[in-house]
Image (tube, grey):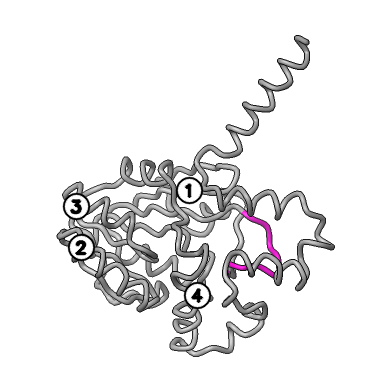
């Protein structure tokens, strides 16, 4: 009996460790990506079944088509899936929100890839001067509706992270959560993030392996925090590695 009780406690600790700092959706994806054999996981059949739950509008051949798309076509692909099915929920949870809020530097903030605007609104309520940006016009319209409903001040803009329309060192802190995995030219995107940052960059990406068939339009895949360190190449930086996410904080 003692052995069985100890086993249950150990299992509970392991489960708590797995779910710490991640959303339910992240954990479901983690288990499917890491415990399903690749011969089953990376197939069109898997994609078809999972996309029926997450988002039936996702194109299974997006990775093949994306590098031939114009900027407008690329933006429209994200407009098509924005706020549809399970993707309407945010990729960020309380751990990530607290992590970002406790590491912001200065008073002016640019969020790249703001999605539904949840984090930008939280930061605005804390008194920061916030600009929420996203490549999807549908996301920006959604954020604008929330701003009106909450009666708070947040600037919004349609922005492609590879071509950020702001001058050098425009913002004290630039936040980029769950966005770098989507961009076509990640080196150019990182260069733009560093260019418009005056003090600090905060980045969070999903920790995941490459799969051809996925329901999230990811093009770049990060599994070790050293990848972000090499990519940003900032001497003053620190990283946090969780089971399903990687965080990078760098001072320029």
Q: Quadrant of residue 113?
A: bottom left
In this picture, residue 36 sits left or right of residue 88: right
What is the distance, in whole Å, between disc 1 and disc 3 at their CAs?
A: 21 Å
Q: Earlier in the sequence, mark 4 or mark 2?
A: 4
On screen, residue 51 versus residue 170, left or right, reads right
Measure the C-alpha gap from mark 4 to mark 1: 25 Å
Residue in the image at 45% along x and 64% along y: 88
Name which of mark 1 and mark 3 comes first in the sequence: 3
Q: Earlier in the sequence, mark 4 or mark 1?
A: 4
Q: Is 208 left, or right, of 24 in this rendering?
A: right
Does the CB distance between marks 4 and 1 fall below 8 Å? no
User: How far apart are the alpha carbons under marks 4 and 2?
Assistant: 24 Å
Q: Nearer the viewer, mark 1 or mark 3?
A: 3
Q: Nearer the viewer, residue 162 or 136?
A: 136
Viewport quadrant of the C terminus? bottom left
Label 1 environment density (alpha carbons within 10 Å; few <14, some 14–19, many ≥20): many
Q: Which residue is mark 1?
A: 247
Q: Is residue 43 left or right of residue 125?
A: right
- Please identify the quarter of the rendering in which residue 89 is found: bottom left
Q: Residue at x 40, y 45 (%)?
A: 236
Which residue is depicted at the point 37% across and 63% down?
Answer: 116
215 relative to 130, above or below: below
Residue placed most toward the observer, 193 or 108? 108
Q: Secondary structure at mark 1?
A: strand
* Disc 3 to disc 4, C-alpha distance: 30 Å
Q: Nearer the viewer, residue 38 or 246?
A: 38
Stretch of the chain drawn in magenta: 208-217
Pointer 4 and pointer 2: residues touching (CB < 8 Å)?
Answer: no
Q: Is residue 106 magenta?
A: no
């Amino acid at each position: 009996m003692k052995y069985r009780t100890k086993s249950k406690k150990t299992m509970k600790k392991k489960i708590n460790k797995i779910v710490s700092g991640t959303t339910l959706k992240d954990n479901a994806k983690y288990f499917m990506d890491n415990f399903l054999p690749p011969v089953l996981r990376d197939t069109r059949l898997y994609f078809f079944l999972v996309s029926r739950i997450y988002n039936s509008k996702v194109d299974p051949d997006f990775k093949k088509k994306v590098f031939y798309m114009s900027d407008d076509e690329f933006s429209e692909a994200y407009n098509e899936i924005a706020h549809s099915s399970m993707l309407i929920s945010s990729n960020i949870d309380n751990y990530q929100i607290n992590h970002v809020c406790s590491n912001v530097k200065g008073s002016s903030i640019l969020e790249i890839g703001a999605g539904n605007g949840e984090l930008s609104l939280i930061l605005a309520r804390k008194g920061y001067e916030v600009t929420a940006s996203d490549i999807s016009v549908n996301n920006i319209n959604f954020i604008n509706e929330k701003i009106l409903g909450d009666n708070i001040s947040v600037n919004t803009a349609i922005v492609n992270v590879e071509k950020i329309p702001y001058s050098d060192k425009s913002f004290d802190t630039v936040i980029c959560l769950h966005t770098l995995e989507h961009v076509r030219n990640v080196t150019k995107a990182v260069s733009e993030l560093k260019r418009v940052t005056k003090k600090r960059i905060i980045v969070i990406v999903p920790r995941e392996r490459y799969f051809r068939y996925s329901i999230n339009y990811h093009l770049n895949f990060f599994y070790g925090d050293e990848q972000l360190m090499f990519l940003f190449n900032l001497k003053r930086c620190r990283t946090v590695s969780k089971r399903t996410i990687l965080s990078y904080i760098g001072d320029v």
